[in-house]
Amino acid sequence: MDLLARVITLFFDALVLPFGTRRAAALVVLSIASGAVFALVFRATSNPAAIKRTRNRFQARILEMRLYPDDPVLLTRAFLGALATQLDYFRVAFKPILILLVLALPAYFQIESRFAHRALRANERALVTATLKPGLDARAVPASLTGSDGVAVDPRSVRVRASREIVWRVEAKETAPHELVARAYDTDYRFSVRATPDARVVGRERRSGRAWDALVHPGLPSLSDHMAVQSVRIQYPDARYRLLGRSWGWLSIFLVGSLVGAAIPAWLLRIQM
């Protein structure tokens, strides 16, 4: 799963590379392109004739309900018929919807990991939290966090016994890639802290023992099962984007862009959805 996640990450890195630090433009283009690709995949994997038939039957049942509002027998039959046609639609559309989910979820997690938060700026601070595995006492486990040149790590840590968390504060001294090393007992975990304003992955979290975590939380390396640390989390600032005179969150832009992107091929190719 880690290999697949790296391949997907490299693919999206190549897509956003031409945009450089223009993150808002990269988000808009990726959102529109994603919607268009999803619509084309749906068309390629669905049965348009069967979908059209079920839609026509559904519309006929709705019309029947409007024609006989005072006849409870006919109204009930039309209503049950409408429900049956909806079930037929889900049966016909199940395959393309399932394929879309398989493709869309990794794309969603990639876009979310790049645009939901932003990297640190120069002289900006963040919290790094390491959660120990069950049964370990955060106040007793020897643990430390060190950083490469350009990132300062406060050697003082906050240790919370109830949640098994150890929290450090880090500060990016310059806009550049930085590396942190979390050490628990005699095992090291090396990971990056982002301080560059491009559209690459902002790796915020990684957990051990979950095969799908590499796809859900790309950007940080896997945690060894032999480590005392169960998860690592970096608290990056939320990202906002200025478009059309307003400040937008990434999800709003993604949803609107995806709908616009899906509508274009749907209209041009008359895709039945």
Image (cartoon, rainbow, N blue to C red):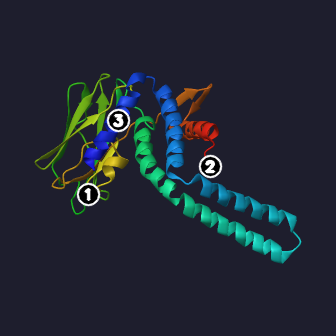
Q: Would you place residue 5 above or below residue 93 in this image? A: above
Q: Which numbered disc, 1 or 2, marks the residue that appears first in the sequence?
A: 1
Locate residue 175, reporting x and y percent: 32, 22
Residue on which the image places disc 1: 209
Name the N-terminal-most of marks 3 and 1: 3
The residue indicated by pointer 3 is 11
Indicate left or right for 113 with 258 as reference: left
Of badges 2 and 3, nearer the viewer stands: 2
| In-image side of 149 versus 48 (left or right) | left
Q: Nearer the viewer, residue 50 or 236?
A: 50
Which residue is most to the right? 70
Q: Amino acid at mark 2?
A: Gln
Q: Which residue type carries mark 1?
A: Gly
Specify whether residue 200 is in view: no
Q: Name the residue carrying label 2.
A: 272
* Closer to viewer: mark 3 or mark 1: 3
Tags 2 and 3 touching, CB below 8 Å: no
Q: SS of the residue at dot 3? A: helix
On the image, which quarter does residue 204 sit in?
top left
Task: Report crowding for label 3: few under 14, some 14 to 19, many 20 or more residues within 10 A (C-alpha).
Answer: few
Q: State the image coordinates of residue 134 (x, y, percent, origin top left).
A: 25, 62
Determine the CA span between mark 2 and mark 3: 30 Å
Q: CA distance from mark 1 to mark 2?
A: 42 Å
